[in-house]
Image (spheres, coloured by chain):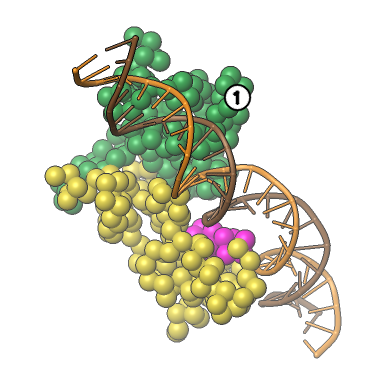
Chain colours: A green, B yellow, C orange, D brown
Amino acid sequence: MSCETETAVVLRHAGQKITPQRMLILSTLRHAGEHVTAPIVLEAVRRLYPYVDASTVYRTLGSAAELGLVSETDMGAGDTQFEWIGRDRHHHLICRSCGGVSSLDNSYLDSLATALYDEQGFQADLGHFAIFGVCQNCRV
Amino acid sequence: MSCETETAVVLRHAGQKITPQRMLILSTLRHAGEHVTAPIVLEAVRRLYPYVDASTVYRTLGSAAELGLVSETDMGAGDTQFEWIGRDRHHHLICRSCGGVSSLDNSYLDSLATALYDEQGFQADLGHFAIFGVCQNCRV
DNA sequence: CATGTAAGTGCAACTAATCGCATTTACAAC
DNA sequence: GTTGTAAATGCGATTAGTTGCACTTACATG
């Protein structure tokens, strides 16, 4: 099954409709590969389909984030970055000093999620997680 | 030592100047008690000192967040909430379904911070942390 | 207390993001 | 196919937040 079809299945399963705008926005994000901002997605989408509105992009990215298809990360500098996730969940370590972003495997947060569920009854959605701090290089 | 003085000490220790605007903004936030947005802080500050600019509020809250005096939490609905922290670090569990916010003790994240430091050399700043998910009541 | 300077502020212009509402459209049921 | 309807879109208006720059001010030093 192609990745387009797979995305469509996830959307439909969540009760969402398959619109050209939506597929185009998600496809753009998936093939962007790295972190991109909403305005960049908008610009790229408009090159193919000029009359897409900014609000549609924000709404699409927001709902896709809730479905776990994309991650939505506030990088701290006024720009929210989006990234395609697919099945491969991971998290981000963001250095306050150099601004570098590194990925973090899911396993680090599994025990936290388990503890929250057992002790608080809170089913944590750890799909998008940004941890700020200082990386090894910048600690000097 | 009064809380005003204590705040001033933290600011000065970080190489920041003690300005009337800054003290007013932080004082407002401290006595607000709960989560408040930047526009609400701005409005409250302007009642006492009308010519404070929005950018000053954002800059002050941002730098105070880096110092760990306040937490800065994206609640997911387009509004970033600020909260006074002082010495009492804690985190937030935010329910996607009912929007409820509950506090979480620091201890849950200590082991995560230790693991990140030992295995990745990353010194995590866990001062402001928002965990999204579904709370016990909403899971049905 | 006078002074040098680095940090902070206000202003204006701008980008980012949200929201309500009228219109359109995907798609399920017949 | 036709049709009903709930969801999605586009538009306009508005709020939230950022940035560059000229001016001001806190405060350290002598």
For the image, the number of numbered tags is 1
A112 or A7, nearer to the observer: A7
| Residue A88 position in % (x across, y down) | 35, 25
As rendered, which of A20 and B69 lies closer to the eye?
A20
Q: Do we see residue A62 in this rendering?
A: yes
Q: In the picture provided, is C2 more to the left or to the right than B75?
A: right
- The residue drawn where x is 60% and y is 63% is B54
Q: Residue at x 57, y 64 (%)?
A: B57
What is the magenta range? B55-66
Kindly identify the residue that appears in the image at 54 percent across and 59 percent down: B62
Q: Is residue A110 above or below residue A33?
A: below
* Badge 1: chain ID: A
Disc 1, SS: loop
Main SS category, magenta section = helix
In the figure, is residue B36 to the left or right of A108? Answer: right
Estimate the x, y position of residue A83 in percent, counting from the top left. 46, 31
Picture layout, residue B60 above or below residue C23: below
Q: Is residue B44 above or below residue A5?
A: below
Give, as a three-letter code, the residue at label 1: Pro
> What residue is shown at x 44% (from left), y 37% (from top)?
A59
Q: Is residue A9 magenta?
A: no
User: In this view of the protein, which residue sits in the foreground, D23 or D26?
Assistant: D23
Q: Which residue is mark 1?
A: A50
**Residue B64 in magenta?**
yes
Residue B111 appears in the rendering:
no
Q: Quadrant of residue B115?
A: top left
Residue A45 position, x and y percent, is: 56, 24
Neighbour class for label 1 at 10 Å: few (<14), some, many (≥20)?
A: few
Q: Residue C6 occupies which quadrant of the picture?
A: bottom right
